[in-house]
Image (cartoon, rainbow, N blue to C red):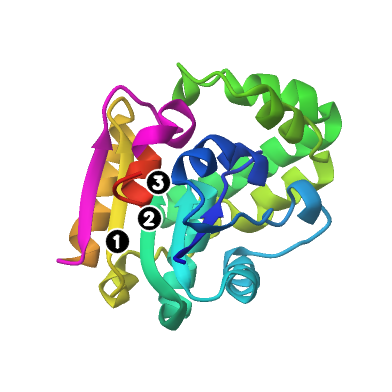
Amino acid sequence: MPRVVLLHGFTQTSVSWRPVVERLGPDVDVVAPDLPGHGTAGAVRLDLAGTAARVADVGGPATYVGYSMGGRVALRLALDRPDLVTGLVLVGATAGIDDAAERAARREADEALARRIEADGVEPFLERWLAQPLFAGLTPASDDLAARRANTAEGLAASLRLSGTGTMDPPWWDELGRVDAPTTIVVGERDAKFRTLGRRLAAGIGPTARLVVVAGAGHACHLEVPGSVAAVISPGT
């Protein structure tokens, strides 16, 4: 039975993957761990490399699927433990910010956001987070939203500080040629920024990579159109 490891995005938990898991069907061995700072791993503090190592221990040989923050973890795992990655699916992901000043600015912005989460609490932050144009058209399922609300402010703040895009310093674009697993880059049709990043990821990885654009979807395309993303992960579902 093929194994698929699903890695969620920031503020999410393993629960967020339920609509995709339901469409993958019973013939797929699904592992969906909570990442550091989230869900059952809310008290865990690890950076992207440490998270990738933790996930590798849990997932073993598998196809690794990561969305946004989870995509950063999956990409790091593919670079550090290629022996375990039989396939790679990156949803709304990037290999980092090129400009050093922009990376520093991103870290400063994430630090400010982390402090705001700690000061205001999870629910007010989630309302603002989900109201961003990036998530226009997304209505989280009730169980997904409840699991997000159960996260702690401390955990989410630590995740921003340790695993935000600005922490990819230097960025990983020059490493992409070392990814040798069959790779699918998935982006939403309405997510212009990540369509551009997706094309760059596919070009950097090379002939083993392909780009899939999910029609009518935004950044969180696995939540908006779970059937399309499940079909990419396991063709024929």
As for residue 213 lying within the magenta part, the answer is: yes
- Position of residue 153 measured from the top left corner of the image (x, y, whole percent): 81, 39
Q: Is residue 156 above or below residue 100?
A: above
46 to the left or right of 99:
right
Q: Is residue 42 visible?
A: yes
User: Which quadrant would residue 212 be assigned to in this image?
Assistant: top left
Q: Which residue is mark 2?
A: 89
230 to the left or right of 14:
left
Q: Secondary structure at mark 3?
A: strand
- Position of residue 66 measured from the top left corner of the image (x, y, whole percent): 48, 53
Q: Which residue is mark 1?
A: 183
Q: Amino acid at mark 1?
A: Thr
Q: Amino acid at mark 2?
A: Val
145 to the left or right of 83:
right
Q: Earlier in the sequence, mark 1 or mark 3?
A: 3
Q: Residue at x 53, y 45 (%)?
A: 106
Q: Given the current orientation, which residue lies at the most extreme left position?
A: 207
Determine contact: label 2, label 1, CB under 8 Å.
yes
Q: Residue at x 46, y 39 (%)?
A: 23
For the residues labelled 1 and 3, the Cα–Cα distance comes to 11 Å
- Position of residue 50 measured from the top left corner of the image (x, y, whole percent): 64, 71
- The stretch of residues the image draws in magenta is 207-228
Quarter of the figure with the C terminus: top left
